[in-house]
Amino acid sequence: MALTGSLLFWTFMLLTSAVLFPVALLIRGVTFSFDRRLRFLHLFSCFWASLYTWCNPLWSVRIEGKEHIDRHAAYVMVCNHQSLVDILVLFRLFVHFKWVSKSENFRIPFVGWNMTLNRYIRIERGRLSGNLSMMRGAAAALGEGSSVMIFPEGTRSARGEPAEFKAGAFELAIRSGRPVLPIALHGTSAALPRRGFILRGKQAMLIRVLEPIAPPWPPGTDAETLRTMAHGRIAGDLA
């Protein structure tokens, strides 16, 4: 049953992506001249991704703390990472941001092409030049008023609690003077394990947006301070 349901899910994703990517191309073309930050295209991408949680009868997604998001602010959004499902679930926020994602994801047919259309930010893992390019791209996005969404663990955690956070997101916050917005995801690893593509049974998932860590920060605050604070808040929420 799990195998059959998984095949249906991934087939539905493939077929709908093939249909919706041309729509994304059309939106990009129509809005290109006046939508500098590609907000309309990202909003459509939120709808596209949300289809897969809305249409799965075994999944439910609840959002708490969305009042902590000021739609006129640009944040360095940081979230724990447990599963591929995290990406679909976070789109349910329907707020504007640019993903920071490994370069391999941009090569996925339809989905990855849409990431390129949205000017999401690539990172070449394991390469210093790739990290520097990512930091420049993320800083530019923040400078134009777009939030950036980063998984600071770098990869999916094998445990329920978040692994150690990498420093890049917090260096970005210090350099740009933008607030860090911690987000705790619950239940996604139970919906789809870290390894494999076989979906599990009925699962309730929760996005909890925590209070921003906003400037002005106390004197002496550095990237390490922000990293410790963000990790502590997310880990505490997951405990």
Image (cartoon, rainbow, N blue to C red):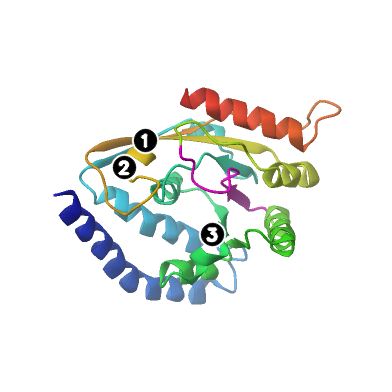
Tag 2 and tag 1, C-beta contact below 8 Å: yes
Compared with 210, 143 (above or below) is below
Q: Is residue 214 visible?
A: no
Q: Secondary structure at mark 3?
A: helix
Residue 96, image x, y percentages = 54, 52
- Dominant SS type (magenta): loop
Quadrant in which residue 124 is drawn: bottom right
Drawn side of residue 182 relative to residue 166, left or right? left
Mark 1 vs mark 3: in front:
1
Disc 2 crowd, CA 10 A, few/some/many (<14, 14-19, 20+): many
Q: Which residue is mark 2?
A: 191
Pick whichever of labels 1 and 3 is earlier in the sequence. 3
Q: Secondary structure at mark 2?
A: helix
Q: Is residue 218 visible?
A: yes
Label for residue 39? 3
In depth, the one of 65 and 222 nearer the eye is 222
Residue shown at 56%/60% (left/top)?
102
- Give the residue type that dot 3 points to: Arg
In depth, the one of 116 and 127 nearer the eye is 127
- Give the residue type that dot 1 points to: Gly
In depth, the one of 45 and 204 nearer the eye is 204
Residue 22, image x, y percentages = 39, 76
Compared with 97, 153 (above or below) is above
